[in-house]
Image (cartoon, helix red, strand yellow):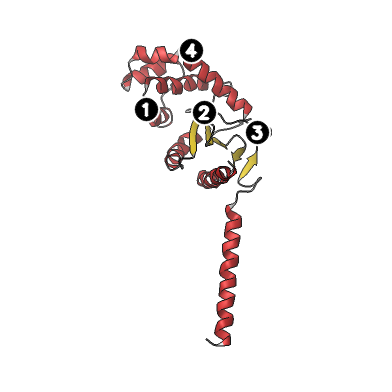
Amino acid sequence: MSSMTARLVSVLIFAVSAFALTAAARAEPVAGREYTLLTPAQTPETQGKVEVLEFFSYACPHCYAFHPLISEWARKLPANAVFIRVPVAFGRAEWGQLVRAYYALQATGDLARLDTALFEAIHKEHQALVNEQTLTAWAAAHGVPAEKFKQAFNSFNVSTRASHAEQLSRDYNVKGVPHLVIDGKYAVEGSNFEQMLTNATQIVEMAAKQK
């Protein structure tokens, strides 16, 4: 190998190494860019795993657009992470009815089957699902016995979970949805939904290393 060739090889090796180091440095999430650090941090309810909370509302058009993306992303989470959705009302009566509908469908075992359908009923079909009567009729039309849904909708369990969800949105200082928080302290940032999920993936990895 000539001296010229050797120098070229050395330059190439240095350039590749520098690029690799730069890429590695960029992979580490940065406060103020990929996330906002919550103050005070909250204690995750899931111990031993990285907890990912998605605050959302069926009434929110942005949540509707985000839903297929976050659903696919959540299915690919590693075993050391858990994904929890938190419906929010922000004190709005109609949104509060949808919070109860979420937990009622969860209680009847129909949430996985009707989750996307409820989003589409509101945003694609423009149905006014704003109270117990309209939501019960919708659920019944989709195969959930009306009385079963009503009992769940008005149950102590659903009331408790709805109140807890509203408290969580206050504790985490949620101002808008969709909103992702990881491990009780990292509020995910991003200029678009894809960037949010890319950042969330990196933050989950960072949080896992910290445990």
Which callout, 3 or 1, points to the residue nearer the camera?
Answer: 3
Q: Evaluate whether residue 16 shows in this view.
A: yes
Q: Position of residue 8 (x, y in %)?
A: 57, 80
Q: Nearer the viewer, residue 170 or 94?
A: 170
Task: Relative to 155, say whether 85 is above or below.
Answer: below
Which callout, 3 or 2, points to the residue nearer the camera?
Answer: 3
Q: Nearer the viewer, residue 204 or 161?
A: 204
Kindly identify which numbered label has been placed on residue 41. 3
Q: Is tag 1's residue or tag 2's residue first in the polypeptide sequence? A: 2
| Label 4 sits on residue | 156
**Mark 4 packing: few (<14 Cα in 10 Å), some, or many (20+)?**
few
Type of the residue with mark 1: Leu
Q: CA distance from mark 1 to mark 2?
A: 16 Å
Q: Nearer the viewer, residue 113 or 30?
A: 30
**Mark 1 packing: few (<14 Cα in 10 Å), some, or many (20+)?**
some
Kindly indicate the quadrant of the structure image that contains residue 150: top left
Kindly identify which numbered label has been placed on residue 86. 2
Q: Position of residue 204 (x, y in %)?
A: 54, 43
Kindly indicate the quadrant of the structure image that contains residue 22: bottom right
Q: Is tag 3's residue or tag 1's residue first in the polypeptide sequence? A: 3
Q: Is tag 1's residue or tag 4's residue first in the polypeptide sequence? A: 1
The residue at 46%/16% (across/down) is 131
Please give left or right for residue 11 compared with residue 72 in the image: right
